[in-house]
Amino acid sequence: MERVPIEVPVMANVAAAGKKPEYLFWVGCAGAYDDRYRKVTRAFVKILVHLKVDFAVLGSEETCTGDPARRAGNEMLYQMQAMQNIETFNSYGIKKIITICPHCYNIFKNDYPDLGGRYEIINYLELIEKFIESGQLKLPGVREKGVRITYHDPCYLGRANGIYDTPRKVLGSLSPGLLEMERNRSFALCCGAGGAQMFKEAEKGDKEIFIERTEEALKTGADVIATACPFCMTMITDGIKYKNREENVKNYDIAELVAESLGL
């Protein structure tokens, strides 16, 4: 089947045409630059277009949220980046922001208001669930019959913001009988990349966190380890490779599973 290119609306062009989209889709650093996570971005954009969501991206005007800088202790750099983003958002009159990265979601929702940046922040899974609940999005189920899925809770969606049921509802629409890891929801083990740990060398210890978490996922017997965060995807993918299981266990973002289900 021939793939038709999707033209993604850019905020500057939309504004120049005198229009104002309902949502800003915040792509994020990983969604823009990481080769693996760019596939997630494309999958989600296809879903937005399929649902006829009125959105635009900032394109070259988008910069980092400042989250890694703040978590690493560079408060000045964080505030500089945040104020630049807030100025950009306000210049376009942006009110609603969709994110695919939990780290972006968390800092926009919980940190930016202290600097005057107050917006409605929506995680992409919340938007997908909303359309499922309204009946506007009907998922026929994953194409591979009998596929077994387990889900890894990202720290910044789960413990930081209490989003546990939403991803499970979306996955439940795809495949009944989600296989839960022994540690899940508020007790879930971190992938090992949060708090700027992604960008530093491993500390001393008996085992790296991403390996232990991957082992927990593999114990479920799942064919797919579903993630909802670029950091988690990197760590879980590395864990699968470390355990030499990449031939029979796959790591997909929930957006990819939804897009696949819809044949997008």
Image: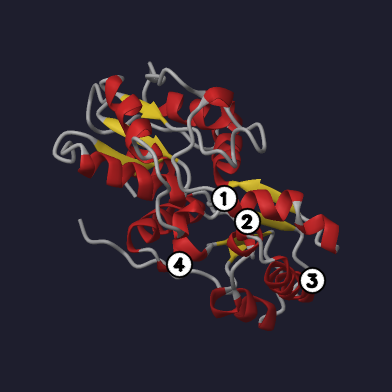
The residue beneath circle 2 is 71
Q: Within the image, what quadrant is residue 74 found in?
A: bottom right
The residue beneath circle 1 is 195
- The mark lying in front, picked from 3 and 4, is 4
- The mark lying in front, picked from 2 and 4, is 2
The residue beneath circle 4 is 32
The mark that comes first in sequence, 2 or 4, is 4
Q: CA distance from mark 1 to mark 4?
A: 20 Å
Q: Position of residue 185 (x, y in %)?
A: 54, 24
Is the residue under label 2 in contact with that under label 1 (CB below 8 Å)? yes
Per the image, label 1 sits on a secondary structure element best described as loop
Q: CA distance from mark 3 to mark 1?
A: 28 Å
Q: Is residue 216 left or right of residue 20?
A: left
Per the image, label 2 sits on a secondary structure element best described as helix
Q: Position of residue 224 (x, y in %)?
A: 29, 32
Q: 9 or 136, which lies in front?
A: 9
